[in-house]
Image (spheres, rainbow, N blue to C red):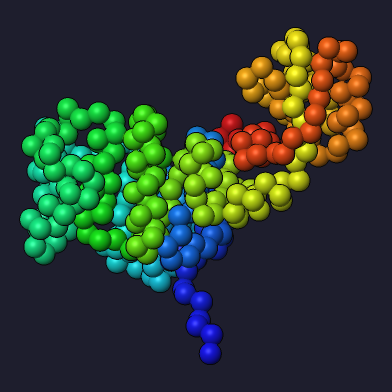
Amino acid sequence: MEAADPKPIIDVRDVTKSFGSKIAVNRIAMRVQPGEIYGFLGPNGSGKTTFLRMLCGLLTPDEGEGTCLGLDIRRQAAEIKRHVGYMTQRFSYYEDLSIHENLDFVARVYGIPQRRRAVDAALDRLGLSARRKQLAGQLSGGWKQRLALAASLLHQPKLLLLDEPTAGVDPKARRDFWEEIHRLADEGLTVLITTHYMDEAERCHRLAYIAYGRLMAQGTVQEVVANAALVTYRIAGARQSAAAERLRSAPAITQAVAFGRSLHVSGHDRSAMEAVFRDVLGPDQTWEPIPSDLEDVFISLMRRAEDNFK
């Protein structure tokens, strides 16, 4: 007898939230499985943070339904909060308290039993033990990130919501952070993370792209790229800026973006694009087809999206 599929950690449909006349989140549906690292991407102001806050019980949807951790997102928000770890965009701990004092305070708020042991374990796990007496206000961005993650994990949540957690930290801190996230997922923790970095998106098991409140794509990286059906060429040669301007004016071209000393030019009709190249490009400029990548797809999706706050 085959084992039944596990229940999704997040399973929501038609979730909508407005602020005045502006729709911040517009009928989003999402399903996230246990132990999954789910990336949530999109331009600033697209509703990512609003959506996270509805999942963890901080905001109530205007419309839509579903569950988070098997609990109704409308009627059981208080219970959801107790089982979710939420790391906000901005560092939100007390800068005049030490690392240890901040974690001890969070443990008291949650009423964690054997508080000292839990705090010591969090310090050890995130490599903070040697800095336990250092004031939070004296920490670099990477160390503040570790403290915030440690605090988010103290009560042993079943779901971790991370809102642009690596913004403003150096590449090594970002890599260390992601290694920890994958260790947590291997241990069964489910993670929903917002990010603007394409290399981080590629580290996720699955991802979704939201633009100005609307869900425009979701799936694995390979599925998102394939479903976009985007055709991309690399243009090499002189006068790249002038070439880009001419190419962008052509209906067959959806984007022309500088990548180093070349251009990445995308569209959906290969024959029409090559006709534009022959007409627009000079004899010293060459083109060749290349695989579309995640960044090509997301730039294309962003250009198609309509800003709902204009």
Quadrant of residue 186 in the image? Answer: bottom left
Residue 29 lies, with reference to residue 173, above or below; the image says below
Give the residue drawn at x 82%, y 20%.
Answer: 286
The image shows residue 32, relative to residue 45, as above or below, that is below
Visible residue check, residue 245: no
Q: How many marks?
A: 0
Q: What x and y, as percent, mark residue 50? A: 44, 47
Report whether residue 271 is seen: yes
Q: Nearer the viewer, residue 145 or 288?
A: 288
Residue 173 vs residue 141, the one in the foreground: 173
Residue at position x 56%, y 50% in the image: 208
x, y percent for residue 143 = 24, 35
Q: Nearer the viewer, residue 14 or 238?
A: 238
**In the displayed structure image, the side of residue 276 where residue 248 appears, left or right:** left
**Residue 213 lies in quadrant:** top right
> Residue visible at 49% across and 62% down?
32
Would you identify the image quadrant in which residue 260 lies? Answer: top right
- Quadrant that contains the C terminus: top right
**Residue 187, position in %: x, y?**
34, 62
Picture residue at 77% right of the left edge, 30% below the top: 233
Name the spot of residue 11 as percent of width and height, x first.
49, 66
Seen in the picture, residue 69 relative to 98 is either above or below; the reply is: below
Left or right: where 89 falls relative to 147: right
Residue lying farthest to the bottom in this orientation: 1
Against 71, residue 191 (above or below) is above
